[in-house]
Amino acid sequence: MGEQTGPQPIQFEAPKPKLNPEAGKAVVPDVVKIGDSERKTPETSRAMKIASATTEFLDDLGKANLVAKKELGELASTRIGKAIAVGAAGAGLEWISGQVLGKAMDTLLLLLPSKNEEDMKKVKGFFNNGFIRESIEDAGVYKFYKEANKLIGDELPDVPVSYLGAAIGVNAADWAIRNSVGQENQLKNLVGIKEKGRGKNKEFSYNMVANKSYKEPANDSKTDLLNFIPRTAGVLADVSNPVILYGTAQVVEGVSAYARAVRDVLRARKVGGESMVQALLTDAKKEKLVGKKRDKQERILDMLEATKENGK
Amino acid sequence: MDDIKRKIQKTHLLSDEQKIALLVEIDACSAEEIAKLDDVLTRFEGEYQNFLAKYHEVVNTELAGILSDDGDVPAVREAVEKVRTGLNTLHG
């Protein structure tokens, strides 16, 4: 695409699926680190294909999710719309935030003294800053929360502190975490977040599916910070279903584990040539044999125990 | 009514919280509302399954290659297993 000249209207595609632009990307740099910087090994290529497929899956799903939620949102005056609103008020109804962002943009444009290219670039730069963008979107979610609450007769709890202020703090933490530990760790933590039921249905509380099996290492110094992430559904690809969050996080984790395993082999190859790789594999085979032997011993012991039991 | 309740429970569109809220309200919904909801959920699940099938195909092809080349390395096998577990979870 060639470079555009002259003032250009800024168009926001609102509503927009809240696909995190960083989703999946964090995996790729990790994978690219395998071996030499520019050279792509078959292993690198495979890992990247899985990472890309994951991103594409979430992207496709995010778009379909958005369309379906819009259709349900059209039922806003019905019980279904209200029920969705109750859930959405907690998790964030992403398409509303896109509209709010569009409105904020329109307002800003009116305030601008001129609409020359330089101004436009500044404005675009401002709104392309993810932190600003997410803060504005959260303001939209808060507005929607209040609207939804009014709609269902103020059954939702009052927001005890300034939601927006909290949201800005959340975003700051969110960005800091993403930058310091990467998307992969953030993903892992996201699936471990507990959510509570809201409003009159307080008796319904649930743990996200993943929380049952995923455990953050306790000795990780960043764990405290990670545990602070209060964001759940809206962050990833407009997908709020815990099964999807957990499944894709596992895939991401698997790809990274593969990257690490391959990196060891490639390092060995680089340092010691094929003989070192063979040594690694030989060790691995030994481990397997030891494992088999242990299994066999355990089976024999079990049989002995069973014999004893029968002999009694 | 049981059918729509099952669909709500199984859908990959909504969060657990939204499912709970919907299940609480569903008995009082009109036939028209339920039909609309049913339509949206059915279409979304169809799309979800299509995306999932495409995703599976790509990932499984790569996993087969990985196992063929490096299947002797235990850490690789474990990694592959994790990816598979993730894929299987998505069917839940």
Image (spheres, rainbow, N blue to C red):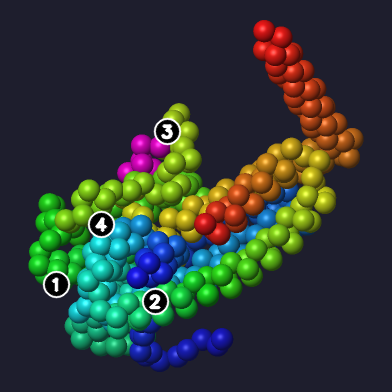
Q: Residues within 10 Å of mark 4 (few under 14, many from 20)?
A: some
Magenta part of the chain: A223-228
Q: Are marks 2 and 4 in contact (CB under 8 Å)?
A: no
Residue drawn at (63%, 68%), measured in percent from left and top? B53
Q: Are marks 3 and 4 in contact (CB under 8 Å)?
A: no
Residue, disc 4: A168
Query: Between residues A9 and A259, which one lies in front from this camera angle?
Result: A259
Q: Are marks 2 and 4 on the same chain?
A: no
**Which three-letter amino acid code belongs to the residue tagged 2?**
Asp
Where, by quadrant of the figure, is residue A102 drawn? Answer: bottom left
User: Principal SS element in the magenta part?
Assistant: helix
Determine if residue A147 is in view: yes
Q: Are marks 1 and 2 on the same chain?
A: no
User: Mark 2 or 4, which is nearer the eye?
Assistant: 2
Residue, disc 2: B38
Q: Are marks 1 and 2 in contact (CB under 8 Å)?
A: no
Q: Are marks 3 and 2 on the same chain?
A: no
Horizontal side of residue A203 vs A194, given as left or right: left
